[in-house]
Image (tube, coloured by chain):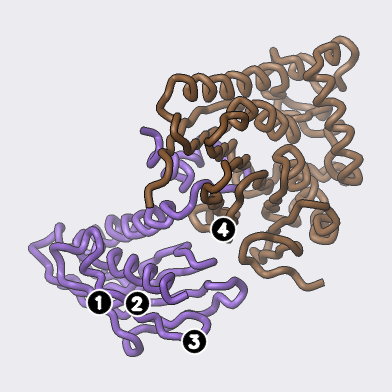
Chain colours: A brown, B purple
Amino acid sequence: MSGPERRAWVAQVMGLPVSVHLRGPLVRTPEVEERVARVLAELRAADAVFSTWRPESVLGRLRGAPPGPAATADPLVREVVGLCETARARTDGWFDARRLPLPLGGTGYDPSGLVKGWAVERAARHLTDLADHDLCLNAGGDVLLRTAPGRPRWRIGIEDPDRPERMLDVVERAGGAVATSGTARRGAHITDPRAGRPAEALRSVTVVGPDLLWADVYATAAVARGADAPDWLATLDGYAALLVDTAGRARATPGWPGRATVSSP
Amino acid sequence: MRRITIWLLSTVAALVLLFSYRTSTMGAGGETGAVATGNDPGGGTWSGTDGGSGPSGGDTGGGSSTGGDGGTTGGDGGTTGGGGTATGSVAQTRWGPVQVKITVSAGKITDVAAVQVPDGNRRDQEINDYAVPILRQEALAAQSAEIDSVSGATVTSDGYRESLQSAIDAAHLK
């Protein structure tokens, strides 16, 4: 019954609670502690560069201007700017970092919706290359998972957006990501890039798939897209989704690994 | 399915006993038993186990479980497999009737609510204010043992403190 030992670390990073859960033989060793510390330090470093809440960050200093040559001289900034362009193309423009309401006021370039998933995916490499250990990294409700061969899959509860203490569904995953975007916790903070207004047709969208960055981007784009989101999500190879609309109705795309019903066309 | 329902029912029985325990600590030794019955949406009766083996049931009356009478049935959970609601029958405590409803989704307890609690005087109000939230937290804690993490729309630090995720984290911090 008792498997390998499990240990958790929790930190406040990027304005979010980040919890790292590890299962494996070395979770009490200094080596693993040091790896966890490296993950958290890297997330803090990413925040110091990309946070649009911090006036002194690289993005904060730009005050909404798209990063020019000076900013993109930093290879990480260049990578994120490139990924934001890819995300815009992959989502038919529903994820668009270029004209968003900025936390410090005004409208402009804000890659935050992509940076979290990117930073977590990138920082997690310090733990994913740890053999014989299982990882469950939750950054503010977006979850990255790895499991060593022969270990039980992680069980991820999907929160009911209207009643966060309730679970809508539970999915079992050995690896990949579970990301949720929506209007539940922070109000309508996802912008419909076409209308320039907060998107409000969907309460939440949860996307499961191989990659946290893309699961998160697709979930955010789906909330922005609204009513057409289920059909679009169903076209994404390797990803599946659970959506909750403003009336509280849950719908899942084909391939959704939980128990919620697949929506009829 | 049967194993799951028995587990659920024994959990509920333990919870109902916990409720009895909490109420009894506020007055003089209430001897209370509680019955949890109900039907799942498939129509089968939830037959249960003796909740007296539950972790907190030791010093109260044993919970008995019967199928059929006394339990009113929800069963409105037709959209998810292994889902639905079940309402336990009314347990008479020395302060008045207590009745609990559980909501099950995907084979898990997703909510516990008291549908009937004593009212009428100040002590009863204290019981309701105190015991009902405890009952709820215990149910969610029992369930969180079965969930490793929670995915939800961006959690703020304020929201985190009261979240199921924080309970899961706390259980593994040391």
Location of mark 4 (residue): A170
What is the quadrant of residue A228 in the picture?
A: bottom right
Name the foreground residue: B10 vs A89: B10
Measured Cα–Cα span from mark 3 to mark 2: 16 Å
Name the foreground residue: A246 vs A111: A111
Q: Foreground mark, 3 or 1?
A: 3
The answer to whether the residues at label 3 and label 1 have Cβ atoms under 8 Å apart is no
Query: x%, y% of residue B61?
Result: 15, 71
Location of mark 2 (residue): B88
Circle 1: element type:
strand
- Chain assignment, label 3: B
- Chain assignment, label 1: B
Q: Residue at x 66, y 22 (%)?
A: A47
Of the residues shown, which amino acid type is indicated by label 1?
Ala
Location of mark 1 (residue): B91
Query: x%, y% of residue A16?
Result: 57, 32
Tell me the tag on residue A222: none
Left or right, A233 with reference to A46: right
Name the foreground residue: A252 vs B72: A252
On whether disc 1 and disc 4 are found on a single subunit, the reply is: no
Measured Cα–Cα span from mark 4 to mark 2: 25 Å
Circle 2: element type:
loop
Of the residues shown, which amino acid type is indicated by label 2?
Gly
Q: Tell me: residue A256, above or below residue A123.
A: below
